[in-house]
Amino acid sequence: VGTVMALNFCLALRPPLMKMTQELVNILQEALQIAEADETVWVGKFMNPKVNMTVTKLRTACIELLCTTMAWTDFKTSSHSDLRAKIISMFFKSLTCKTPEIVTVAKEGLRQ
């Protein structure tokens, strides 16, 4: 969670501390996979409420990272259009989540 939040901070700075590289795109794709994960699967695997809370924090941090990325000029190129479309789809899917924190962050992503 801390690593995702730190990465989000670095991308939110103007100018960002990072450049768009293939490694960063890979990290963003992994963040998207975490954010898209079906919450019923997570709850089924981790019955411990503390673990569920941590997973929710991780998903929320990943969605926040993707929100920041969507606003980043370097990410608005046509070479990243497929990933952008998947992120937008994830924002809409997250609106149906039962966790209020995730819904709030997804709404913010769509608002941007």
Image (spheres, rainbow, N blue to C red):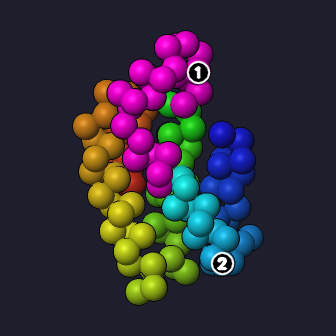
Q: CA distance from mark 2 to mark 1?
A: 32 Å
Location of residue 102 (image quadrant): top left
Q: Which residue matches tag 2?
A: 21
- Please state if 16 lies on the left or on the right of 81 as rendered: right
Residue at figure coordinates x 63%, y 55% from the top left: 8
The reply to whether the magenta stretch includes residue 43 is yes
Location of residue 112 (image quadrant): bottom left
Quadrant where the image shows the N terminus: top right
Residue at figure coordinates x 64%, y 64% from the top left: 11
Task: Give the structural element (helix, strand or loop) at label 2.
Answer: loop
Residue 105's tag is none
Q: Position of residue 99 (x, y in %)?
A: 37, 28
| 52 up-or-down from 91: above or below | above
Q: Position of residue 72 (x, y in %)?
A: 53, 72
Comes first in the chain, label 2 or label 1: 2
Q: Position of residue 89 (x, y in %)?
A: 30, 58
Whether residue 105 is visible: no
The reply to whether the magenta stretch includes residue 107 is no
Q: Position of residue 97 (x, y in %)?
A: 31, 34
| 22 up-or-down from 112: above or below | below
Residue at figure coordinates x 58%, y 70% from the top left: 25
Helix, strand or loop for the magenta stretch, by majority: helix
| 97 up-or-down from 12: above or below | above
Task: Give the structural element (helix, strand or loop) at label 1.
Answer: helix
Most extreme residue toward the bottom is 78
Residue at figure coordinates x 56%, y 43% from the top left: 61
Q: Are marks 2 and 1 in contact (CB under 8 Å)?
A: no
- The three-letter code of the residue at mark 1 reads Val
Magenta residues, as a range?
Answer: 32-55
Q: Which residue matches tag 1?
A: 51
